[in-house]
Image: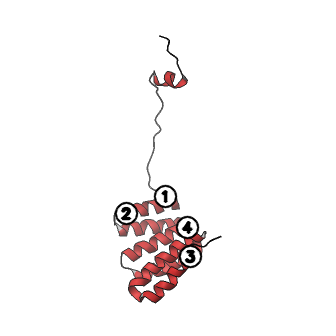
Amino acid sequence: MTRTWTAANLLLSRPVSLPIPKVEVNGPQSAFDWNVLGNSYTSTQDYDKAINAYKKSIEMDPTFGQAYCNLGCVLYQSGKYESAILILKKSLDYMVTPEEKSLSWNRLGDVYRPITGLWKCYGSLSKSRPIES
């Protein structure tokens, strides 16, 4: 019986010794990383840590709209409605696409619902509909 060797067979048939890079973890290195960390804290309902992570993200990139939007959402979930409204309105300045802006308007509507009733909420939610191009 003849055995056909491919490159994969050759590589898998002998042990390979590759240097393992040493990775130092110093925490998030970018605004995006801090935003992702904030999302992780939010998913575990650790809102204080999430708020700090989103603020660090904004500090590193003051034009990162998603961090403002996420911060506003966590402030809302923490019951800090007035702060959430201010931050979500600010997020609209930095959201680029119609879909991103729609997310901010939708979250703003969520905040208005419990504190001002349906009419103010309706104004925000009506702007959250996706814009057709």
Of marks 1 and 3, the one in the foreground: 3
Q: Which residue is identified by label 4?
A: 64
Extreme-left residue of the structure: 45
Q: CA distance from mark 1 to mark 3?
A: 21 Å
Mark 1 surroundings: few (<14), some (14-19) or many (≥20) residues within 10 A: some
Question: Which residue does the image show at 60% across and 69% down from the upper left?
Answer: 97
Q: Is residue 36 left or right of residue 6?
A: left
Image position, residue 100 (x, y; %): 55, 69
Q: Who's the residue at 47% across and 87% down the image?
A: 120
Q: Which mark is residue 92?
A: 3
| Mark toward the start of the polypeptide (4 vs 1) | 1
Task: Identify which amino acid the numbered label 2 is placed on.
Answer: Ser
Q: Amino acid at mark 4?
A: Phe
| Real-space CA distance between mark 1 and mark 2, rounded to the nearest whole angstrom | 15 Å
Of mark 3 and mark 4, the one earlier in the sequence is 4
Residue placed most toward the observer, 114 or 65: 114
Q: CA distance from mark 4 to mark 2?
A: 20 Å
Image quadrant of residue 15?
Answer: top left
Kind of residue sitting beneath label 1: Asp
Q: Circle 3 — which element?
A: helix
Label for residue 43? 2
Q: Indicate left or right for 115 with 131 as reference.
A: left
Q: Nearer the viewer, mark 3 or mark 4?
A: 3
Count how many numbered circles sit on residues in the image.
4
Q: Which residue is mark 1?
A: 33
- Quadrant of res 111: bottom left
> Can residue 62 be seen by looking at this rendering?
no
Q: Nearer the N terminus, badge 1 or badge 2?
A: 1
